[in-house]
Amino acid sequence: MAYDVFISYSTDDKRIAEIVCVQLESRGISCWMATRDILPGTEWGESIINAIANCRLLLLIFSSTADTSKQVLREVEQATRNDKIIIPFRIENHEPTKSMRFFLSATQWLDAFTHSLEPHIERLVTIIQSLKNKLDGSDLQKQKPLDNVSIILHEPQQLNDSTTDAELVNLGIQICREVSKELQQNVDDEEVGKTISKSESRPGDVVKVIDILCNRIARRLIKAWGERHNCEIMLTGEDLPSMKDPSFQPKIVCCLDSLDGTQHWLRGRNLYGTALSFFRKDQDVVSSYKLRASVVMDANGRIFFADEDSGKAFECGKSTPLQVTSDYSVALLDEAHVCTVARRPNQYRVLAMHLVNGSPFQGLYTFGGNPILAALALGKYDAVFQADASFTGDIQPLWDWLPGGHIAYRANCHIFQLDGSDFDVLGTAENCINNGECNCPYVAALNYELGLAIVEWLKNTQISI
């Protein structure tokens, strides 16, 4: 019989292994444990070898006793020989011996020795379910980008408030980390090949590739949100049933939540941010609300979005808006703060909000729509965050919004094209206006040192494709 997970553990860690096993199996992940599943009279070693061969992955309950257990080491070695995925679930802050490290040197460790065990098990469940999808051949990365698709929400059910968002938290973290990886791994992807090649690239190619990646990321979010809300979300090339508006062809699902606790709403936008109406399954009509926002998820699983019509920012699942105005987009600053972008006459204003006490911070004028960077204001300093938060640096406000989509910076600052081209130092609005090439969304003005770091990242990304 095939199993999803072979659980390897030392005798001293049996209780924790059993807890993990129960939690995994309660989520539909089948497990194999030697003390439970080896039948009386069966040869022990043969049973272990067969179980590892027939499992999808090996979960190592790692501790100091497991590290010195010869039986555990043999099981890890056997899994390596069978090319099995190994997940070390470290329940103790202990460094592995050289023997164990030999087999686990290229493995991503999952630390579970801080705080309570429950949130770490939730994260483990998410990882294993994701790996199951990949091993089943349903890995969403392999699917082609959507093309003029519609989205159908079937049988919406009441949101279960007792469930957690831990799986979505880790999905969001995983997505952030994998964006740059996908740029490198999808060399053979037909769509990416059409967009950018090794021999030649044009300004904005990186942006187009990211559009494609956002499409793939959306597929993951669609699946995750469907599981979270007990809703089945299907993608189809056909029109929505009874839909009279042929323009309602969303290519990306931004968010699925329950604003009033009873009705589920589907928010969509196309690849380039064009506002699309919401669809309510129960009324079978397109509502008048519209969305032009990115949707972000913080480390605690909270989802934030901006509603264009109301001019308010919302946290998913709550009908009360945040105390910051936002009718354009939202961006995540850190685990405790969310930033929103609100339109003003001839300019956009970024507002930061502390999620703990609900107090807004001083705003920063900036431009919207840049797919790589967001200028965010927090406390006494300003910082620029790259999309995956890997580059940060101080900047001096204030940005100006100028006619024609041009931007100027009031400090001694460089403007960089996203393909790595370095424009001249700009100090006045006139210089920027006269430079016809400085046009959004392919241009970002920022601190010089930070700019060099981001440009280097972009160059490396393009070279690796």
Image (spheres, rainbow, N blue to C red):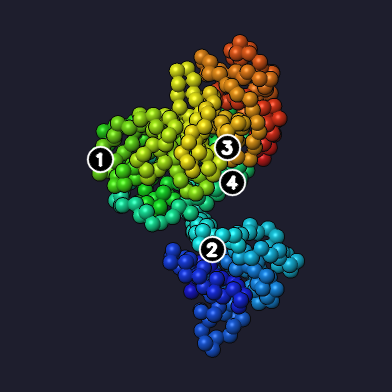
- Which residue is painted at 59% across and 60% down in the image? 114
Q: Earlier in the sequence, mark 4 or mark 2?
A: 2
Give the CA separation, mark 4 to mark 2: 24 Å
Q: Is residue 368 left or right of residue 201?
A: left
Amino acid type, mark 1: Asp
Which callout, 2 or 3, points at the residue further toward the start of the chain?
Answer: 2
State whether residue 129 is above or below residue 311.
below
Front of the two marks 1 and 4: 4
Q: Amino acid at mark 3?
A: Ala
Earlier sequence position, callout 4 versus callout 3:
4
Q: Earlier in the sequence, mark 1 or mark 4?
A: 4
Query: Could you say which is closer to the camera, residue 3 or residue 346?
Result: 346
Q: Can you identify the residue that label 2 sits on?
A: 117
Mark 1 or mark 3, which is nearer to you? 3
Q: Which residue is mark 4?
A: 177
Structural distance between the alpha carbons of marks 2 and 3: 31 Å
Residue closest to the eye, 429 or 456: 429
The span from disc 1 to disc 2 (Cα, nearest Å) is 44 Å
The answer, for residue 309, to whether it is visible in the render is yes
Where, by quadrant of the figure, is residue 426 drawn? top right
Q: Position of residue 370 (x, y in %)?
A: 54, 29
Mark 1 or 2 closer to N-term?
2
Q: Which mark is residue 284?
A: 1
| Residue at disc 1, secondary structure | loop
Neighbor class of circle 3 (other Cα within 10 Å; few <14, some 14-19, many 20+) is: some
User: Quick one: label 4, few (<14), some, or many (20+) residues within 10 Å?
Assistant: some
Q: Which residue is mark 3?
A: 387
Q: CA distance from mark 1 to mark 3?
A: 36 Å
Q: Residues within 10 Å of mark 1 (few under 14, many from 20)?
A: few
Under mark 2, the amino acid is Leu
Q: Is residue 121 above or below residue 143?
A: below
